[in-house]
Amino acid sequence: GIVRQSLIGEGGDGCSSVLLLGEACSGKTHAVEWCIERLRDAQRSLVVLRAFGRSYASDAECVRHLVTQVAGQLPEQPRGNASFEQIMEWLRQVLTDRFRTATSAVIILDRFEHFCSRARQTLLYNLFDIAQEVGVKLSIIGMSEKMDVMSMLEKRIKSRFSMRHLHAFRPVTMADLVPVLMSKFRLAASCDLKAPFRIEFARRVEAALWAKAAQWQHHLELGRTPTWFLWQCLPAAALLHDAAAAAESKVAQSQSTEASSAKRPRLSGAS
């Protein structure tokens, strides 16, 4: 949907941005990684850069981290007393050179609110500016747990750059939860196991998850995270064993009920 459109630059000039908002464990990272995986299947030259809020002592340190992801090692860099403008120009040159062989690029800014808290938000401004200059489809994806993070952006950024918003929520029904858990249990096609086994394994695991519906309903209402439910399923062998035992118990009860009904004497009608 919106995330994938942003990654591939649909409906625009090839450069776009999107902001994913949601509490912890609501699926923001999963949504982005799923889209990136699909995009890589179509575009092998995709470049993905990641930056994590609160991980850098300065904006310059963040820039150096981005450059190492592009170049593998730090190319010749500005002197230690270089201005931030010189460091950003260095990043622009490195990205432009690296993107000559790329069709698309993505910069993921996790904990977006921490980038907004920097003085004058110079790093953010320059990243958005670079996204319009490097000559490839470059998308910036921000993720944050702060629902009001857009209010933290300076006017000069809001006036020049638009960000689409997407809200992520924790699963509140089994219909929402089961696909999330199945994404962790489904065996990859690249593994050594044969397709019939992989398909049957997925079918049995999914059935075992749905069998937990009544037991898990209260926890869904409490707002438990998908991670909590995942831990309840491990090891997978125990999950499958419990589901098989429950199914056998139901069959035994059904057979017992039928047997009791068959043995019950019929009352003859009055003549």
Image (tube, rainbow, N blue to C red):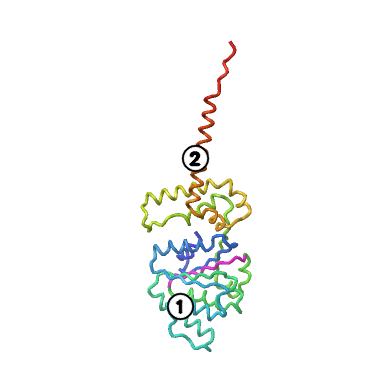
Residue 58 pos. (x, y %) = 56, 80
> Which one is in front, 102 or 49?
49
Q: Is 268 drawn above or below residue 226 in the view shown?
A: above
Q: Identify the residue position indicated by label 2 in the image.
A: 248
Q: Is 254 drawn above or below residue 245 in the view shown?
A: above
Which quadrant: the C terminus? top right
Q: Residue at x 50, y 85 (%)?
A: 86
Question: Is 198 on the left or on the right of 150, as rendered?
Answer: left
**Circle 2: is it few (<14), some (14-19), or many (20+) Cα within 10 Å?**
few
> How much space separates mark 2 and mark 1, taking CA atoms?
57 Å
> Which one is in front, 41 or 131?
41
Q: Is 175 drawn above or below residue 89 in the view shown?
A: above
**Residue furthest top as drawn:** 271
Q: Identify the residue position indicated by label 1 in the image.
A: 68
Q: Residue at x 52, y 39 (%)?
A: 249
Residue 38 pos. (x, y %) = 43, 61
> Which one is in front, 194 or 250?
250
Magenta-drawn segment: 136-146
Q: Earlier in the sequence, mark 2 or mark 1?
A: 1
Q: Is 51 drawn above or below residue 249 in the view shown?
A: below
Residue 18 pos. (x, y %) = 53, 66
Q: Secondary structure at mark 1?
A: helix
Q: Amino acid at mark 1?
A: Thr
Question: Is 38 contained in the magenta span?
Answer: no
Q: Amino acid at mark 2?
A: Glu
Q: Residue at x 61, y 68 (%)?
A: 149
> Which one is in front, 82 or 219?
219
Residue 192 pos. (x, y %) = 36, 57
**Circle 1: is it few (<14), some (14-19), or many (20+) Cα within 10 Å?**
some
